[in-house]
Image (cartoon, helix red, strand yellow):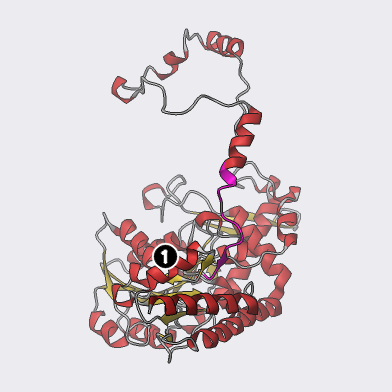
């Protein structure tokens, strides 16, 4: 809600002070054709009590008690209550971007710690102070690859990368002299090395992969990195499930040149899709081509440790036309939440959380594979906490009926991959108890029997 404090008398005094007769005079420079000369199609304004009652009525329409097994790039892990409590400390309050380090040391230090933690998780030498979300971070990585490999104008994206990430990348590249080509996946649900090698040539700047991929499968990063590097291309790896980095080897240590990702799973709830937390890391040598901001550690004249914005090469700064991107901010609050969460977990805690997620997913997968007519689509490929089940018939009608009963059993893959119309992507993590999986198995079994 927004409180408008100016009375009609206040408005008249303000207009008199600037020599204007009417509020309309303030918009005299705007062309007439752009002005709205009719009331907005909105109901009359409400008083405060009426507005609160209306908002409560709208909030009451939200469904509660729904059991969800959705993941697909938007992972809502449990967030300890201590995270929210620490987020509200005064050291982190700032009115705007921390350009003045002398009044922003709390914010700057938190971002520096975030960069350090993400550097350890991704294996990258440098990680920036965050971007908007995982999809735009992947798109920025492709643009960066185009700058690093200036004479190469083709970019490859695995079809096993999240389709919405690929769509975002296509939007970013739409008006540029860069072409994006997709590389398909094989029967194991991972990127086809054979198809990749046919697509690679001396005009390819980079290959974009996802780990774990959009089908929940683990890509063979060393083999794919070797193929890309042999052709002189960069390897970009997108990680949309950040908890997986507690168990899987860091992508940069397996050959990735740029690592991007979505950190929402460490920072908060899905909350209708956002806000996200874009992760972006690369090597020290490539740091000048990296978008966004970089917080560094320095010393003042007295030798005291302090933190500053070391680099912020966007278009509003001195680089102007040579700016690396138009990224105007970083997700400071989400980055702080992720930093606090990781500090509370520690390395051993994050690994334990990842092992719980992986163990729960495997137990659930075994339980669901026992259902008549159900099988794991990519049975020979390792996965983290998401897996694809193939049902006896089309998946979407079955999932719609379950959702109507308060059970979101997973994501129907036919909307993204027509050849997988009978498949569902199921995500299981630390929040799912055995009784939750039992309810999923019971509901899915009943609907399959009904459909048959």
| Residue 336 locus on image (x, y percent) | 65, 58
The part of the image, by quadrant, that contains residue 177 is bottom left
In the drawing, does residue 332 fall left or right of residue 80?
left
**Which quarter of the rendering shows the N terminus?**
top right
In the drawing, does residue 101 fall left or right of residue 411?
right
As drawn, 125 above or below 304: below
The front one of 435 and 296 is 435
The front one of 433 and 313 is 433
Tell me if I can see residue 123 in this picture: no
The front one of 88 and 385 is 385
Tell me if I can see residue 253 in this picture: yes
- Picture residue at 68% right of the left edge, 48% below the top: 104
- Picture residue at 47% right of the left edge, 46% below the top: 317
As drawn, 131 above or below 51: below
| Residue 431 locus on image (x, y percent) | 64, 72
**Which quarter of the rendering shows the C terminus?**
bottom left
- Picture residue at 38% right of the left edge, 73% below the top: 395
| Residue 34 locus on image (x, y percent) | 32, 25
Whether 62 is among the magenta residues is: yes
- Picture residue at 64% right of the left edge, 41% below the top: 95
As drawn, 408 above or below 105: below
How many neighbours does mark 1 have within 10 angstroms: few (below 14), some (14-19), or many (20 or more)?
many
Look at the numbered disc 1 and give the secondary structure of its residue. helix
The front one of 256 and 355 is 355
Magenta residues (range) = 58-69
- Kindly identify which residue carries mark 1: 138
Magenta stretch mostly in which secondary structure? Answer: loop
In the drawing, does residue 155 fall left or right of residue 320?
left
| Residue 25 locus on image (x, y percent) | 42, 13
| Residue at the far bottom in the pictured view | 380
- Tally of numbered tags: 1
């Amino acid at each position: 809600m927004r409180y408008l404090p100016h009375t009609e008398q206040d408005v008249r005094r303000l207009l008199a002070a600037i020599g204007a007769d009417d509020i309309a005079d303030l918009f005299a420079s705007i062309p007439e054709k752009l002005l709205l000369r009719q009331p907005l199609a909105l109901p009359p304004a409400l008083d405060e009590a009426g507005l609160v009652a209306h908002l409560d009525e709208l909030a009451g329409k939200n469904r509660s008690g729904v059991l969800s097994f959705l993941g697909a790039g938007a992972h809502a892990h449990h967030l300890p209550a201590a995270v929210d409590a620490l987020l509200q400390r005064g050291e982190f309050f700032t009115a705007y971007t921390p350009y003045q380090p002398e009044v922003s040391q709390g914010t700057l230090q938190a971002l520096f710690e975030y960069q350090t933690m993400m550097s350890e998780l991704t294996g990258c030498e440098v990680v920036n102070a965050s971007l908007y979300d995982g999809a735009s971070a992947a798109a920025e990585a492709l643009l960066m690859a185009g700058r690093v490999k200036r004479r190469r104008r083709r970019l490859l994206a695995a079809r096993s990368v999240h389709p919405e990430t690929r769509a975002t990348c296509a939007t970013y590249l739409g008006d540029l002299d860069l072409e994006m080509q997709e590389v398909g996946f094989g029967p194991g649900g991972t990127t086809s090395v054979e198809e990749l090698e046919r697509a690679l040539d001396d005009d390819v700047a980079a290959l974009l992969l996802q780990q774990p991929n959009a089908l929940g499968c683990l890509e063979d990063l060393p083999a794919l990195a070797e193929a890309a590097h042999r052709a002189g291309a960069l390897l970009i790896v997108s990680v949309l499930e950040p908890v997986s980095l507690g168990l899987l080897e860091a992508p940069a240590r397996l050959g990735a040149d740029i690592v991007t990702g979505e950190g929402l799973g460490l920072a908060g709830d899905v909350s209708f899709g956002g806000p996200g937390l874009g992760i972006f890391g690369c090597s020290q040598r490539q740091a000048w081509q990296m978008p966004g901001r970089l917080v560094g550690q320095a010393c003042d004249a007295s030798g005291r440790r302090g933190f500053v914005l070391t680099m912020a090469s966007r278009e509003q700064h001195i680089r102007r036309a040579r700016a690396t991107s138009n990224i105007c901010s970083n997700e400071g609050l989400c980055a702080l939440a992720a930093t606090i969460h990781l500090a509370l977990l520690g390395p051993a805690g994050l690994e334990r959380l990842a092992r719980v997620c992986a163990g729960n997913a495997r137990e659930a997968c075994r339980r669901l594979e026992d259902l008549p007519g159900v099988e794991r689509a990519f049975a020979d490929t390792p996965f983290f906490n998401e897996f694809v089940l193939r049902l006896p018939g089309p998946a979407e009608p079955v999932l719609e009926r379950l959702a109507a009963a308060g059970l979101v059993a997973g994501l129907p893959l036919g909307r993204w991959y027509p050849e997988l119309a009978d498949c569902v992507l199921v995500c299981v993590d630390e929040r799912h108890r055995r009784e939750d999986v039992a309810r999923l198995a019971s509901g899915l079994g009943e609907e399959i029997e009904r459909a048959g």
